[in-house]
Image: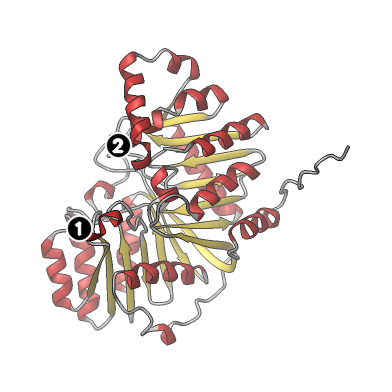
Amino acid sequence: MSHRMDPPAPTSADDYRRCFEAALGIPFTQGNHVEPLVNGCHIFPAMIEAITQAEYSIDFLTFIYWQGEVAERFGRALAERARAGVVVRVLLDAFGAHSMPKEVLDELEQAGAEIAWFRRKARWRIWQIDNRTHRKILLIDDKVGFTGGVGIAAEWDGDARNPEEWRDTHFRMTGPVLDGLRGAFLSNWIEAGKPGFEHARSYGAPPADGPVQAQVIRTSAAVNYSDIATLFRLVLTIAQSRLRIATGYFVPDSETIDLMCQAVERGVTVEVLMPGPHTDSVVARMAGEDTFERLSRAGVRLHRYQPTMMHAKIVLLDDVLAIVGSANFNHRSMGKDDEIAVSVVDQQIVSKLSQDYDQDLGRADIIEAERWQERGLWQRIRERIGRLLRPQA
């Protein structure tokens, strides 16, 4: 009788990189710099400083642009560079940025910035309303880019000291990784009806002088499945020792739940850090809680962040590789929205993000399986409702 031979498990950084390349068909680039920026007090100054130094182009894409002083600050910085002759392209999701202040839009348009809206509401295209661009991208010249979880709104301005200051991590990047960010911007820009290639010949090659290997994955706003789902299921399948997930919305589907439980069974420590009492989506919380009983009984460590909304999107695989970007561990990111994810191989970055994770766990409560079993009837009813609404969470 023949026995099936399982492939060898990855043991080196190169092994993990090759697993990702083989599964997703996207090569890593060499020579990048990636700098984590924790919370708005560090994120926004770095982004605005980069904007003020722009010499010839700014491409800015965001899902959320709401009210607040930081929204006005961003608008003023972009408008100033447009008046100085810099090509400024601003792409806004028509759902997420619908409440953007009119004064900011007027100032940008009067300064000469070009503004586009992704998937405006149209009655004859009702099916598109539920599929958004959730990407957050800022590109300055061919020199520096930013991506991650942060939106442009007052909720992110601060240092996660109270419920009004959300916890998030964004990333400043240089090197060939910028080409992947630009491609993600252009795909949404062109769908919004704008010409995208008139500056293509002017794009310089970003200098490749950093230590980081990076892979950029972008997904399209369509229903059912995406490369983000492949990416998350891949890490659950190949994890050998520890998998740490931080997400603003935790709503895994049944197959992902199975993979999480199987990872624990083979000895992997699986940790999830998600919002606790403070969240902007009650539906996502109820849908996520419907998974707690099985996951906690299987040994998955579920942590709920207490001080404020946890909005970071980070996955740490075996202390070797990090996945960062705009994607949450939920149905929307895996099957409905345009997302961007960057896989990073660099020991220093992974170590820094793991230290941040440890600090966040110090401000979180863990779901204990025995105590969760004793939850009341109303909580169980909420979970049933959440199960019905899971596809929207």
Q: Measured from the top left, where is residue 1 in percent x and y?
A: 88, 37
Q: What is the C-alpha distance between the residues marked 2 and 1?
A: 31 Å
Q: Residues within 10 Å of mark 1 (few under 14, many from 20)?
A: few
Residue bearing mark 2: 279
Of residue 244 and residue 158, the one placed in the foreground of this image is: 244
Q: Is residue 350 visible?
A: yes
Q: Residue at x 17, y 53 (%)?
A: 67
Three-letter amino acid code of the residue under disc 2? Thr
Please determine whether, in this image, residue 333 is positioned above or below residue 290. Answer: below
Q: Residue at x 30, y 36 (%)?
A: 279
Please determine whether, in this image, residue 309 is positioned above or below residue 136. Answer: above
Of residue 285 and residue 73, the one placed in the foreground of this image is: 285
Q: Measured from the top left, where is residue 9 in percent x and y?
A: 73, 46
Q: Residue at x 32, y 45 (%)?
A: 159
Residue bearing mark 1: 123
Q: Secondary structure at mark 2?
A: loop
In screen coordinates, is 101 left or right of 190?
left
Q: Is residue 121 visible?
A: no
Q: Residues within 10 Å of mark 2 (few under 14, many from 20)?
A: many
Q: Secondary structure at mark 1?
A: helix
The quarter of the displayed image where residue 117 is located:
bottom left
Foreground: disc 2 or disc 1? 1
In screen coordinates, is 190 left or right of 66?
right
Furthest toward the bottom, the residue is: 201
